[in-house]
Amino acid sequence: MSEACLNLHRAGEYAIAALTRLALESRGAAGEFVSVRALAEHQGIPKSFLSKILEQCARAGLITAKSGSRGGVALARPAEEISLLDILEACEGSYRRADCVFYSDRRCEGPACEVFCPLRKREEDVRLSLARTTVAEMARSLEIHPLNDAPAAHFAPGGR
C-alpha cells in the first residue's frame, strides 16, 4: 500500500512554498521584501500566476506588497504567527466540509451532528494540524532540505 501526501490545490501549494521562502530569506521577520519574480522563478511558475496567489495572501493580511524596483512581497507578521491553515484558507477558502457525507441534501453540522462521522473527525484532525504548523517550521525544514540550493542573493529586493 502506498502512502500519499495531502492533496492540495496548486494555489495553496504555491502560496505555502512562496511564504516559506519569504520566511527563510527574512529569517522569519516581517517586513523583509523579496522579489515576486525571484519567487516565481524559483518555483518554476509564471510570475502572473504567483502574483494572483500572493494578492489573496495580501488581502488576508499574511503578506504586504510594495511596488517599484526595490519592491516585492514581505511577511506581514512573524513567520511563527502564520499557520498553513491561514495560507490555505486565504487561497482556497474555508477548510471545512460543506455537505454531509451521508446525505447530499444536508449541510455538515460537524461535532453538533448526532451522526458525527469518522471522516469529519479526521478532517478536523487535519485542520488542527494545519493550524499548528507555522511558516517558521516550514522554513526550518526548507533550510536543511538537501535540494535547497538557492543562494539568498537570488532573492534580493528587485530580484533578477
Image: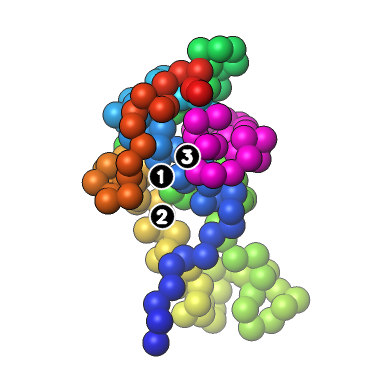
Circle 2: is it few (<14), some (14-19), or many (20+) Cα within 10 Å?
Answer: some
Circle 1: is it few (<14), some (14-19), or many (20+) Cα within 10 Å?
Answer: many
Q: Which residues are magenta?
A: 37-62
Disc 3 marks a residue whose amino acid type is His
Q: Secondary structure at mark 2?
A: helix
Circle 3: is it few (<14), some (14-19), or many (20+) Cα within 10 Å?
Answer: some
> How many numbered marks have been drawn onto this rendered protein structure?
3
Return the disc, 3 or 2, that comes first in the chain's sequence: 3
Query: Is residue 92 visible in the rendered structure shown here?
Result: yes
Quick check: is 52 in the magenta stretch?
yes
Q: Which residue is mark 2?
A: 130
Gap between marks 3 and 1 measured at Cα: 22 Å
Query: Is residue 112 visible in the rendered structure shown here?
Result: no
Whether residues under marks 1 and 2 lie with C-beta atoms below 8 angstroms apart, the answer is yes
Query: Could you say which disc has been placed on residue 49 in the image?
Result: none
Q: Is residue 156 above or below residue 93?
A: above
Point 27% across, 42% down: residue = 143
Q: Is residue 104 above or below residue 157?
A: below
Disc 2 marks a residue whose amino acid type is Leu
Gap between marks 1 and 2 measured at Cα: 7 Å
Disc 1 marks a residue whose amino acid type is Ser
Whether residues under marks 3 and 2 lie with C-beta atoms below 8 angstroms apart, the answer is no
